[in-house]
Image (cartoon, rainbow, N blue to C red):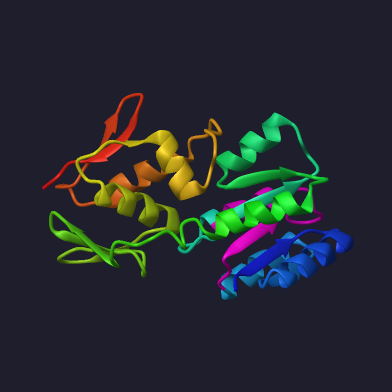
Amino acid sequence: MAAILIVDDEVKLRTLLSRDLSAAGHQPVPVADGETACDYLDSHQVDLVLLDLVMPGIDGLTVLKHVTDMVTRPPVMVLSGVGHVGARVQAINAGAVDYVTKPFVLAELMARVNRHLGTPHDRPEDGRYLTHRGFRLDTHRRILVLPDEVRPLSERETAVLAHLLRRRGDVCGREELLHDIWGYDFDPGSNVLEVCVGRLRTKLPSLTTIETVRGVGYCIAED
């Protein structure tokens, strides 16, 4: 059972989504505005956020920024009546994993919800701990354990680093990483992967480098 935060000022939509998510075995948490959503996220852990963009008070993009600043960040699916490309690109660049335009087909939305709930939480693990060149990655606690300190990672940073470490020595393509980590079936043209890799590079010890293979993807060299 997944906890899913529904952030939308439309009562009918919150009721509809809550009913269908409950029927699917999930735990919906409906809220009517961005301020309530941010307060709830500060004190509760959720598995997915369904987020409207246009709301009175704190808008959806502000809530999205609040989520991306969290240490443990749930994936965010934007549900919006704004369908132009600029809004999609802005939301994806801000950290959303998906963008669904209203009105939507409920069956398709539920399929997308299930896909994002399975990424990365239900991806097969090759063990909780991954070690490389003097550090240990704890994939459960999302931390890098170094000889003299512990560095926290975000959910996406952990997933990307674990993916690269499990395939160390191989080049992991951009489309592969976007699909396996973010759940994208296409390249949205955003820089979410580049931003994530850039943050990882600042947190990794100097002996470990994430190499850029131009036009292909990324690689961590073998020991």
* Vertical position of residue 8 compared to residue 100: above or below: below
The stretch in magenta equals 45-67
Residue ID at (84%, 67%): 15
Image x and y of residue 213, in percent: 28, 29
* Vertical position of residue 203 compared to residue 48: above or below: above
Residue ID at (66%, 53%): 111
Residue ID at (17%, 41%): 221
Query: Across the whole image, how many numbered discs are drawn on residues?
Result: 0
Residue farthest along the top direction in this orientation: 215
**Residue 165 left/right relative to 12:** left
* Vertical position of residue 85 compared to residue 53: above or below: above
Image x and y of residue 11, in percent: 87, 63
Image quadrant where residue 45 sits: bottom right
**Residue 154 left/right relative to 70:** left
- Judge by depth and name the residue closer to the eye, 153 or 163: 163
Residue 56 colored magenta? Answer: yes
